[in-house]
Image: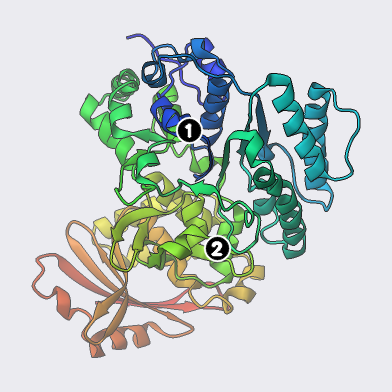
Amino acid sequence: MEEQRYPVSLADFRTIRENDFVYVDKTEYVYRLVSKPGYYFLGRPRRFGKSLLISTIKAYFEGRRELFKGLAIDRLQPGEWKIHPVLRLDLSADIYNERDSLVNALSSILSRWEGECGITDLKPTLSKRFEDVILAKEKSHGSKVVILIDEYDSPLSAAIDKPELFELYRDQLHGFYSVLKAMESHIQFCMLTGVTKFGKVSVFSGLNNLKDITFNNRYAGVCGITESELHGCLAPGVARLAEEEGWDTDEAFRQLKFYYDGYHFSRNLLDVYNPYSVLNALSDCEIRLFWCNTGLPSLLTRLLRDSDYDLARLTSERITEMRLDSLSVYNPDEVSLFFQTGYLTIKDYDRSPRSYRLGYPNREVEMGILSNILGMYVPDRRDAMLNVGDMRMSLDKGDPERFIAELSAYLSGIPSKLRSRIGKYENYYHTVFYCILSLIGLDIDVEYNTSEGFIDAVVKTGDYIYVIELKLNGTAEDAMRQIEEKHYASPFAADTCRLYRVGIGFSKSTGTVDSYMVE
């Protein structure tokens, strides 16, 4: 079987095409975008193909037709391609942690462009220098300029938890980006990409002609890999993965779908696979947590912990379109931040109130989030997956006492300096408990609603049901009394699985299980 070459760390269209790497053809989307002048914004998670899209558009406007041979746009636009000068700006290439970081980065980019244009009379502001570059490019090429800005939000994202620095960067970017509107008559096409869309910060307040295609049905598959693309040009790689793992091809497709599919970027709920993980899986011929292993931003886990957010709500909350579409630095929203960074996705859409239900897109993301949060809550336990695997076996075998012993041993890894802060986080033990049970793949229902109250957790295996009540600085007897008095076991009376009532008391002083009862 001929081995395909996958561009797992490449985002340059020319390099990919000239060196015979697999290219998932997105040029039909490019054709829709470039067929008429316009200003566009696209938001997608990191490592999702935004830079490759920008590179592809750049090659199109530069007239590199030989690179597009056999692709959709070659067929859709058979006539002459008009060449335009292209200014590409990638703001992800610098580190933004000082007051002068953004100004220095923009000045460096402008200096390079000014050198290309032969500009020696430099204006005093970045915005005026930007205007001069646009005018010089248009004059020297005899055609309007194309401006492509990749990761526009990198400086803002880097300073999201530093309000003073964020304000400074916001004002600097507002002045710089205002040039785009002022020079509209000299610009043929403009596109900006980013991960987060910051609302109420006036970065784009002057760009009233900017069309946001982030949630547009027509562009739902512009980045990432769709089902038809996986079964089309990537099918040879899937067959090779199946051969290496000893699966049939159908099983290989199922595994890829379970771990990497499930992203939805519009109301039509088109399934999109994570391209970084899929290409790595096909290249290495194994299923692993590729995307999540590139790093869950610490800001996300800190935000969940410090806000005392109930983690189980991440996969059950409904959210309005306005809230989903905009992120405020002044009042960070856990749900919209997790969505925009790719750790939650749209699960369904209700047209009447224009609201969405969100959830984890796939098993890779779920495991990545939960293991990272667990590592923050119990930082000294590096063998988390081994521990939770042992816990699963105990519950599968109907041995809740052993499960509790293993849970207690695991929690003993909480460092003393963290124990003193546990009281600040009301949901601490519930979050740890939820992470552990979700990581081992059990059917867990947190805050299970009954007619007489909410059960802390209901866990189901093939043969057993566990009704669990947790008490912080309370006793197992208190927990068991609540189970009995509120008849928490009644909803499962007709179930053929064996039922266990489990009461667990946690001690804030010791940081682990203080008492338990099982009936």
Q: Position of residue 224 (x, y in %)?
A: 42, 35
State which quarter of the image contains the C terminus: bottom left
Q: Can residue 9 be seen at all in this image of the molecule? A: no
Between circles 2 and 1, the one closer to the viewer is 1
Left or right placement of residue 413 versus residue 434 in this view? right
- The CA distance from mark 2 to mark 1 is 51 Å
Q: Residues within 10 Å of mark 1 (few under 14, many from 20)?
A: few
Position of 336 relative to 75 (above/below): below
Position of 489 relative to 120 (above/below): below
Which numbered marker is on residue 333? Answer: none
Which numbered marker is on residue 377? Answer: 2
Q: Give the residue type at disc 2.
A: Tyr
Q: Position of residue 157 (x, y in %)?
A: 64, 52
Residue at position x 48%, y 30% in the image: 34
Secondary structure category for the residue under label 2: helix
Q: Nearer the viewer, residue 467 or 220?
A: 220
CB atoms of marks 2 and 1 within 8 Å = no
Q: Nearer the viewer, residue 328 or 21?
A: 328
Q: Can residue 119 be seen at all in this image of the molecule? A: yes
Q: Give the residue type at disc 1.
A: Lys
Residue at position x 71%, y 53% in the image: 174
Mark positioned earlier in the residue sequence (2 or 1): 1
The residue that mark 1 highlights is: 36
Left or right placement of residue 208 versus residue 385 in this view? right
